[in-house]
Image (cartoon, helix red, strand yellow):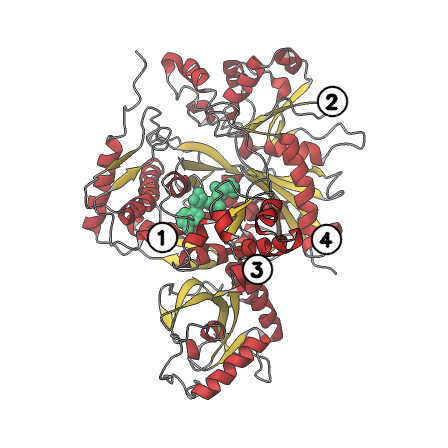
Amino acid sequence: MAEQYVAAVDQGTNSTRCILFDRRGRLVSVAQREHRQYFPKPGWVEHDAAEIWRNVTRVVPAAVRQIGADPGQIVAIGITNQRETSLLWDRRTGQPIGHAVVWQDTRTDRLITELAGDQGADRFQDLCGLPLTTYFSAPRLRWMLDHTPGLRARAERGEVLFGTMESWLIWNFTRGADGTGGLHVTDVTNASRTMLMNIETLEWDDQLLAAFDVPAAVLPEIRPSSGVFGTATTVLPGVRIGAALGDQQAALFGQTCFSPGEAKCTYGTGSFLLLNTGKEIVRSTHGMLTTVAYQIGDQPAAYALEGSMAVTGSLVQWFRDGLGLIHTAAEIETLARTVEDNGGAYIVPAFSGLFAPHWRSEARGVIAGLTSYITKGHLARAVLEATGFQTLEVVDAMNADSGIALKALKVDGGMTANNLLMQFLADLLDVRVVRPMVTETVSLGAAYAAGLAVGYWPDLEGLRSNWHRAGQWLPNMDPERRATEYANWQAAVQRTFGWIRPEQ
Amino acid sequence: MLRLLAAAPNGLGVADLGNALGLAKATVHGIVRTLHQVGFVEQDRSGAHYRLSDAFGRLGETYLDPNELRSRAINWADSLASRSGEVVRVGRLVEGKVVVVHHVFRPDDSDQDLDVGTTLPPHACALGKAVLAFDTSGASKPKALEAFTTRTIVDPTRLADELAAVRAKGWAGEFEEHTVELAGIAAPIRGLGGLVVGAVGLTGRIERICDSRLRHRTDLVTMVRATAEAIGRDLRDDR
Ligand SMILES: Nc1ncnc2c1ncn2[C@@H]1O[C@H](COP(=O)(O)OP(=O)(O)OP(=O)(O)O)[C@@H](O)[C@H]1O
């Protein structure tokens, strides 16, 4: 019998790709296409959802063709996506209503302040696990309903549908021959990023719907992350859609962090550390987010604590494009290795405020400890170390919230190619840092969850045995030096606070 | 042509260049394409205009940053390690030694240490022979060939023959030349303009790397060569 594969569709912020995996979890082919970023106003970021679907219809067949497979060899499709990016489309014609509003978009900041009112940004945290910020979908949905003439009435009549990217893709994958009637569904992980789902019941919450003034008629049905959603009618007709998960949750799954206490951090443009807390819903008092990690079929959901760092790889990009001190991101390591240490310089990249665990929107970045001794080599170190220190802050906060001390950190993402940074992380966190053989953990996680749903893989243990270590860094830093460095960083962070002052 | 391009920061089209130099369009096109392939000129977004790239101004500097090589190689090297089940390394020649730029563990979760940054004797390993075979600097020709095992090639004439064979077949093999009971396979990585910028290879116990007649397994050779080709394609394409 011909070899069988699972297809993962990773709908990311910059591109959409399809990766095929074999039974041992090995990557066998990749096809990728970038889509356009629209910046209509300062702070606004949009995507054309129709373009994104067109890209899906191209990359999936391309990945299958690359290995000369036929669609019959694909046993399941797993979908993973940029989280929180929000879209409305017409139920009848399937046309998107305007562009999708991307997670980085800050147009809802005024609305957020209004909604927070006297009760503060954490007024919904008990219900949905999230603080009020511009990241999550509900404020975005509300904004769209408020700013498109006639839309609210149509929404209330059920003529328009809301979804994040996985909903849009599944709806299109399952459209009827007459062009209508796709499945309108989402999964618990994506729903947990809207601020509309009750984190305990895993259902849309009336209180939250009322608070955001969102009609229930626009919302998709919430399903488990791993389980057959339906069968594709196009692109790979007849193939079952076995999973949908938000990208960071997919990475946690791909890293096989199935037990409470296991954590992974994905180092890309921004970085996201997720700690599996099992069936327990841990409510953070240290600025972490409570989120659903995954749900397999009708089993109870697994939860996670999440620490988000907004500026990590993008600080390297700034160093390259903004300062022009290097030509490629990787060269930062070469430059950083021209010096022994940071020379006393610290860069706190609060470009648009500070994320976890501080959540200070009025903070702005600083370079602290600047002296005439500092060279570009020291600054390169400081850039890389900023990612290390931010990780340490998040890990500290998580340890405090969960009472579980991290034993090892599984890492993935583009920045893991940087050995200097990986060693610094191990030194600073004082734990083993481990890189798995498959760095495309986001896609792998979606494939795993989908393959599990259709019986391609038997169980979680089977998946664990596919995980292999590709590289490992062991801590090797004098504890005293670690403490001093961290104290210096914290002092630098203090200096970012209160920079943006309310207008007179 | 380079002078014209250097004087036109907004770039020039093929027709502009042809007119200025009195050359046929097809001729200009051929030259520009070559310059583009080696990274000396770049195209603007529309694809209609060419201009000098900043790589041209940096000719004297290291041709390819080793960390950049690792970044480009990482996914392909992982895939080679997971499919072959062996240790994978990417190396390049620096001052007559092979420096390990990237190292992927054997996927069996046994205790292994990263050896990125360490050096290997080029004449005694597959990785080294794969880069030595294409080295023109001369400076890297080792003077005295140190013996590590009884199989290490220590005779310069034999080494020259071996390197000629590597050039002819496009990959290098090693058989107990550095460590007893270990064998290796490596292939050169060709960057912009076809220049060899390093090599990727695997190392493992003889019985896994070689067939029953002690020849390097052809399936592994194919995998290693495909990996080197894929990394090279990545390096050459992204312009
Ligand atoms: N060797 C390196 N050292 C430091 N930073 C690096 C290195 N290589 C890549 N980066 C940084 O990592 C980021 C890219 O990582 P990655 O490809 O995982 O991005 P991503 O956030 O997943 O993007 P996308 O959403 O498009 O997939 C960039 O911000 C880049 O600056």
Q: CA distance from mark 4 to mark 3?
A: 25 Å
Front: mark 4 or 1: 1
Q: Residues within 10 Å of mark 1 (few under 14, many from 20)?
A: many
Residue A453 appears left or right of B110: right
Query: Under tag 4, what secondary structure?
Result: helix
Image spot of residue B20 (x, y percent)? 57, 48
Image spot of residue A336 (x, y percent)? 31, 51
The residue at which mark 3 appears reads as: B230
The residue at which mark 2 appears reads as: A92
Q: What residue lies at 39% left-to-right and 74% top-to-bottom?
A: B140
Q: Is residue B44 visible?
A: yes
The earlier-in-sequence mark between 2 and 4 is 4
Image spot of residue A123 (x, y percent)? 41, 19
Specify the amino acid type for callout 4: Gln
Q: Quadrant of residue B105?
A: bottom left
The residue at which mark 1 appears reads as: A333
Q: Residues within 10 Å of mark 4 (few under 14, many from 20)?
A: some
The reply to whether the residue tagged 3 has its Cβ within 8 angstroms of ligand 1 is no
**Do discs 4 and 1 share a chain?**
yes
The earlier-in-sequence mark between 4 and 1 is 4
State which chain disc 1 sits on.
Answer: A
Are circles 1 and 3 on residues that touch, CB within 8 Å?
Answer: no
Q: CA distance from mark 2 to mark 4?
A: 33 Å
The residue at which mark 4 appears reads as: A73
